[in-house]
Amino acid sequence: MSSHPAERLSAFLDGELSATDRAQVESHLRECPACAQELEELAAVDAFAREVPVQAPDGYFEALPARVRARVRRPARIPRPALWAVAAAAAVMAVVVTPVVLQHERSVMAPAAQAVPEGPAPATLAASIAPAPPAFAQSGDGSAQPLRPAKSEVHGRLQEREEADKPAENVLSKKQTNTADQAFRRDAPAAAPAAPPPATVAAAATPAAAPPVPAAASRAAVAGFEEARTSAPEPKVMAETVEAQTAAAGERARDEAGADARKERARPAERKLAAGSGAFSHPDDRALMTEKRYEALLTRPATSVAQARALRDAWDLFAHDFPADARADEARVRAIEAGVQAWTLGRDPGDLAAVRARGLAYLEAENAPQAARVRAALAALP
Amino acid sequence: MDVPSRLDAGRALEARAPAGPAAPDAAEADLLARARDGNLFAFDEIVKRYQRRVYATAVRIVRRHDVADDVVQEAFLRAHQALGRFDLSRPFGPWICRIAANLAVNHVRSPQAREEALPEAHAETPVRGGSPLVGVLETEARTELARALDGLSADQRAVFVLRVFEELSYKEIAEALEISIGTVMSRLSRARERLRVALTPYLGAAMARRAEGGER
């Protein structure tokens, strides 16, 4: 009898031995019941180990995707719209700095704009432009080039939105005297209505007699931007912000029921906003609003059926509101993807029908640049 | 998890293809492509599909939930970062499990991990499953298995997990853990031998039951 194969039994079990070795082991096994028995036991060890289930704490797998998402870095592809937003924001900043020019135009704008008191206090203005946390005000050197305050203005607002997101319930319950500000904050928890409501922007632009942008606000805004700059090269500013938002969104998604409730609450506001968008006559304002809305939708979570449906409808609304925008097509496609997500999560026949209808409508359109992507999304459906 | 009979001697002779799940479906490739392009929903879906499997791989190696949780998150993050280099025609599951196994082993090797106490509770919980062992015997056997697994080194567990649960080939395991095929072979052999010795009293009963009951 050849020597006991001992170590080789395991590899034999896995079919990982060379032909020669295998033949040797086989021949040995025929003569040696002890080794044959051992082989069987080794196989039984595997089988037994496989039968023992692994268990994680309750709710672990429900929360994990959002936790992972909160940490995932968005690839650098996103900055394209971000750069665009920066340009738009720069234009808006110009509006703020030279309010006199635009005052005239504003007076024929949205009713909301007219409702704003004629000369908002500088403090209000500061808050609406750059509600930067104290930490921001201390960082940065404030020696900005003309473009920077504009970028930081976007940053500041997104920061505000994030802040408003966290203690959402508190913010909602707080009585605020400034209705414009309140309107903005109320929208914030939705993460969807990206644009400031007409009143806020109008307020920023209105005060012909107001001093130039309050120095503190401007510095804070610049500081906010500087901080963002330190962590990322310039074109990534928005990406970084979006990431931070994503993180916040991920945290929010934990409390799905709460998030859904907020979303539902926010929906009317969103629609109102969209409807009000026509009131913007200045292309720069409109561009900024479009951009913010788009960015917010990009990062909005859809981890529950209700969220996915809301997102689907929000993208639809975006495409409907800005049919000529370069991103309208992306919005249509994302509406379809969110629709697929809604169906995947809920398996509701209504969602299935809805997403099919959207998909087919998209594919039948004359101009369907992303037909392949839509087909792929639809392929996931039964 | 499928439980084919490992006692079929003939099966041992088959040159098994690296198993795991079948080739990825088109939907998965599409999800991965979209995730690579920055679509967070798509990546979310990927996480949902694989989180249990990745967690199982991690916790079987590190033997602690909190550490496994770190490993799982890190594995998904790394996978996300590396999606650009990932060949979409290949199955995602084995790939991410390899990443997780590597992270798990590295964690256990880290000085920080050495200072941490041994797991207070075993990852495997003695719940009723479709095991051929029943009642007390089964509970005992599972406890014994958990103890035996604790007794293995993380390196041995990693090899064992990738082979037995992920059904990777020795070559794949060697690549994943950056060790030689010979090392894979010897670690696996030693791991199985230790488990076999620890479980012998129960394996006899299990095998007898299998012999009586035939194929499951």
Image: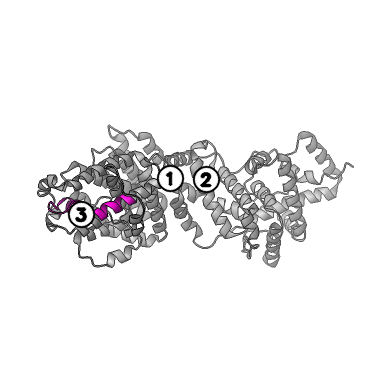
Determine which quarter of the picture holds residue A159: bottom left
Badge 1: residue crowd in 10 Å (few <14, some 14–19, many ≥20): many
| x 36%, y 40%: residue | A235
Q: Is residue B127 left or right of residue A187?
A: right
Q: Secondary structure at mark 1?
A: helix
Tell me, yes or no, whether the highlighted magenta stretch contains residue A219.
Answer: yes
Distance from Cα at disc 2 to Cα at disc 1: 16 Å
Label 3 resides on the chain identified as: A
Whether residue A295 appears in this view of the structure is: yes
Q: Which mark is residue B78?
A: 2
Image location of residue A21, percent across then percent down: 79, 37
Image location of residue B91, percent across then percent down: 54, 40
Do the CB atoms of the residues marked 2 and 1 lie less than 8 Å apart?
A: no
Amino acid type, mark 3? Thr
Label 2 resides on the chain identified as: B
Whether residue A241 appears in this view of the structure is: no
Image location of residue A374, percent across then percent down: 37, 38
Q: Which mark is residue A200?
A: 3
Question: Are tags 1 and 3 found on a single chain?
Answer: no
Residue beneath label 1, please? B42
Q: Which residues are magenta?
A: A202-223
Badge 3: residue crowd in 10 Å (few <14, some 14–19, many ≥20): many
Q: Is residue B79 left or right of residue A37?
A: left
Image location of residue A302, percent across then percent down: 38, 52
Q: Viewer-proximal residue, B213 or B138?
A: B138
Q: Viewer-proximal residue, A271 or A195?
A: A195
Which dot, 1 or 3, sits closer to the camera? 3
Count of marks overlaid on the render: 3
Label 1 resides on the chain identified as: B
Amino acid type, mark 1? Ala
Amino acid type, mark 2? Arg
